[in-house]
């Protein structure tokens, strides 16, 4: 039986009942087994009935201490750790323990089966809720509960869920005349090794309704992954969600967690700025810092679970390496300014669709591939250093800098029409039309610097730092977080591999340029590795290995062997040849002596980087040879200053123009075959 999902209010639970929220449908009985500290096995089953949920408890008599008649010491809770005892749930012959405030109920003994059992009923309108319990032995005047944590918990109206895959997953959906009327079952999973508490927060994208469900560390956690499953959800496309994490130490004390804020799921592939309802703050165990709650909060959107984009049969052009010419562009810079005024209408400026308005300009460059600057969901500087700003900002020194917050979600700032939910479709439209024009699409990816530096303004832009900064970031999270992604951690490695595959499969991109790539070569303790696990897996991945994968290092001294042989490549990865630009400009711009030999090396394929060299004990990832076409001969790092600025136009424009033309000629005639 399926019925409409209804959002209720957000009032706190009282002794007379439990707070109302989103009634859910449990599709089948859920069974749980709990082992107490005295190794007593407690079995529980939750069955959906016509008027609610039946919760059954049973304890084999043989597992109990001799001579005891156990009592269930219990209470209901959802997002408030305080147990409540609605009158409709209390079994007969139960009594309230004044010392603890919990309810105690008799378990009845079945002598024939040697089992102690109890049946409880939870009305449908109270779900989802957790039934927390421990055992009480009156004969021993002692409690018997979990070996760790305060108690056990039985999910009622929701299920324990599964730890894989991470992020939100559509488990099942009913048949319905309209897609929004289908009742869906969703699984949510998030990684956090060090959090001691985790809650799933769910609401509508318009900010209406609010549901928060606390996860139990025994029932809802497997290894380092927290998980839960909700059923009966309708109009999934309008739902958004986030995670509230808590742990030892508060943010103000330099701790890693701030439960006043709701975290963006690192695995959610879409995000929206949502004005939080008051209930989201009412249920928080800690108030946010004064003055830091204005503006919307970025939450994960579930629309990708039900949306479908029409690629119209357009396929990527698959240009050979030797024929590849890359043009770099930033969406904002390319669609605004004097050069864009004639071809980009005002409504398309600073948007994905505005790039298509200048498609002829791109093709006129002779390019075969477009390298898009950071289009990941990012934060920007919009406040003075040290001050408070909008919730979608991070304070940095200097000009505006955009740093990734999510490696799955497209940035909503480049949407035409003002609907942030259209970001994914408009970026796909851009990629489809570039493919139709015979152009490959590469994405600039920065797997080093994130927007989590210092936790963002007021801690609002938390994701990695607020969920488990000690695992996701180098040096940990907290107010002093550096924001540098710890790519040596297995969980981060898996996150990045999954993200790359997502962009290839879902967005049909043709490759990636890894800026600040040296961060990928370091282990969890920042030691540089000859054979970094994440790079090795990227090179061997069946989905990724056939794409154009470019490593662009900003600091070669942080590469293996001090960058003597460049970035670990395994014969698969391309390399942004920094030596090409350095040597060409030293000769042409700086008129440095002794550069003719280096110039000749660059013009003939940079054999010092790309020729095979198996001597000297080099690992295969550095010793294998590559064709000259594996080198990206560029005069500057990805999306750096303009060429004229690079050759000194500010000092002498005439000389700069001559140097620029000569340098461009060198790029055009350098060996790539």
Image (cartoon, rainbow, N blue to C red):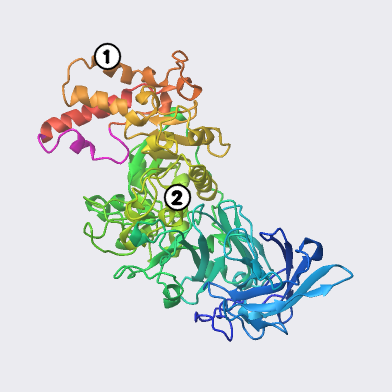
Residue 490 covered by magenta stretch: no
Task: Give percent across and percent down for residue 546.
Answer: 53, 35
Q: Residues within 10 Å of mark 1 (few under 14, many from 20)?
A: few
Q: Toward the viewer: 305 or 215? A: 215
- The number of discs equals 2
Q: What is the span of residues highlighted in magenta in the rendered image?
A: 636-652
Q: Name the image quarter holding the N terminus.
A: bottom right
Q: In terms of secondary structure, what is the magenta stretch mainly?
A: loop
* Rendering coords of residue 35 (x, y %): 69, 59
- The one nearer the camera, 472 or 595, is 472
Image quadrant where one finds the C terminus: top left
Q: Nearer the viewer, mark 2 or mark 1?
A: 2
Q: Residues within 10 Å of mark 2 (few under 14, many from 20)?
A: many
- Residue farthest left in this picture: 651
Do we see residue 345 in this rendering? no
User: Residue 597, which numbered label?
Assistant: 1
Q: Quadrant of residue 59?
A: bottom right
Q: Secondary structure at mark 1?
A: helix
Q: Is residue 292 visible from the viewing direction of this image?
A: yes
In the displayed structure image, the side of residue 473 where residue 640 appears, left or right = left
Q: CA distance from mark 2 to mark 1?
A: 42 Å
Residue 345 image position (x, y, % from top left)? 31, 60
Residue with the mark numbered 2: 407
Left or right side of 65 for 163: left
Q: Residue at x 45, y 15 (%)?
A: 613
Please give the name of the residue rendered at 75% of the width and 75% of the height, measured from the top-left corner: 107
Residue 68: name its quadrant: bottom right
Indicate whether residue 637 is drawn in magenta: yes
Q: Secondary structure at mark 2?
A: loop
């Amino acid at each position: 039986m399926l019925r409409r999902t209804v959002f209720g209010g957000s009032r706190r639970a009282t002794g007379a009942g439990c707070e109302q929220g989103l009634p859910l449908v449990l599709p089948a009985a859920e069974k749980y087994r709990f082992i107490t500290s005295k190794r007593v096995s407690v079995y529980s089953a939750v069955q959906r009935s016509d008027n609610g949920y039946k919760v059954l408890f049973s304890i084999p008599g043989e597992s109990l201490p001799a001579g005891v008649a156990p009592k269930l010491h219990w209470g209901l809770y959802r997002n408030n750790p305080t147990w409540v005892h609605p009158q409709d749930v209390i079994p007969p012959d139960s009594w309230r323990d004044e010392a603890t405030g919990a309810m105690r109920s008799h378990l009845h003994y079945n002598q024939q089966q040697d089992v102690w059992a109890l049946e409880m009923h939870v009305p449908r309108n109270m779900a989802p809720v957790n039934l927390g319990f421990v055992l009480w032995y009156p004969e021993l005047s002692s409690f018997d509960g979990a070996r760790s944590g305060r108690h056990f918990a039985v999910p009622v109206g929701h299920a324990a869920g599964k730890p894989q895959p991470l992020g939100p997953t559509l488990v099942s959906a009913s048949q319905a005349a309209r897609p929004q009327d289908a009742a869906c079952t969703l699984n949510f999973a998030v990684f956090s090794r060090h959090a001691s508490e985790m809650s799933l927060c769910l609401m509508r994208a318009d900010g209406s309704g609010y549901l928060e469900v606390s996860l139990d560390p025994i029932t809802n956690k497997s290894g380092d992954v927290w998980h839960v499953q909700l059923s009966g959800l309708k109009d999934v496309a309008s739902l958004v969600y986030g995670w509230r994490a808590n742990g030892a130490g508060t943010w103000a004390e330099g701790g890693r967690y701030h439960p006043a804020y709701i975290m963006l799921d690192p695995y959610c592939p879409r995000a929206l700025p949502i004005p939080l309802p008051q209930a989201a703050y009412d249920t928080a165990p800690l108030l946010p810092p004064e003055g830091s709650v204005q503006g919307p909060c970025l939450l994960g959107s579930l629309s990708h679970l039900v949306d479908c984009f029409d690629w119209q049969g357009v396929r990527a052009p698959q240009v050979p390496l030797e024929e590849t010419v890359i043009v770099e562009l930033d969406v904002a810079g390319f669609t605004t300014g004097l050069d864009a005024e004639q071809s980009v209408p005002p409504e398309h400026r600073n948007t994905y669709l505005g790039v298509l308005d200048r498609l002829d300009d791109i093709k006129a460059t002779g390019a075969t591939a477009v390298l898009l600057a950071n289009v990941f969901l990012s934060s920007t500087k919009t406040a003075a250093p040290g001050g408070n700003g909008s919730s979608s900002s991070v304070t940095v020194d200097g000009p505006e800098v955009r740093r990734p917050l999510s490696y799955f979600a497209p940035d909503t700032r480049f949407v035409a029409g003002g609907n942030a939910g259209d970001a994914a479709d408009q970026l796909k439209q851009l990629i489809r039309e570039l493919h139709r024009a015979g152009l490959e699409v590469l994405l600039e990816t920065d797997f080093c610097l994130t927007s989590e530096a210092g936790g963002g303004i007021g801690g609002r832009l938390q994701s990695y730092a607020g969920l488990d900064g000690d695992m996701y970031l180098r040096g940990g999270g907290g107010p002093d977080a550096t924001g540098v992604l710890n790519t040596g951690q297995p969980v981060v490695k898996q996150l990045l591999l999954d993200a790359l595959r997502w962009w290839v499969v879902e967005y049909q991109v043709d490759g990636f340029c890894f800026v600040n790539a040296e961060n990928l070569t370091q282990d969890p303790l920042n030691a540089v590795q000859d054979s970094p696990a994440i790079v090795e897996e990227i090179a061997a991945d069946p989905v990724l290995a056939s794409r154009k994968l470019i490593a662009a290092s900003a600091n070669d001294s942080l590469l293996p062997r001090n960058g003597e042989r460049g970035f670990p490549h395994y014969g698969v990865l391309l390399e942004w040849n920094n030596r090409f630009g350095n040597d060409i400009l030293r000769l042409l711009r700086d008129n440095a002596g002794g550069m003719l030999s280096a110039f000749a090396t660059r013009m003939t394929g940079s054999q010092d980087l790309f020729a095979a060299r198996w001597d000297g004990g080099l690992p295969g990832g550095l010793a294998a040879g590559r064709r000259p076409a594996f080198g990206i001969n560029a005069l500057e790092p990805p999306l750096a200053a303009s060429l004229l600025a690079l050759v000194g136009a500010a000092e002498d424009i005439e000389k700069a123009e001559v140097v620029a033309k000569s340098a461009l000629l060198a790029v055009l005639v350098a060996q790539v075959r």
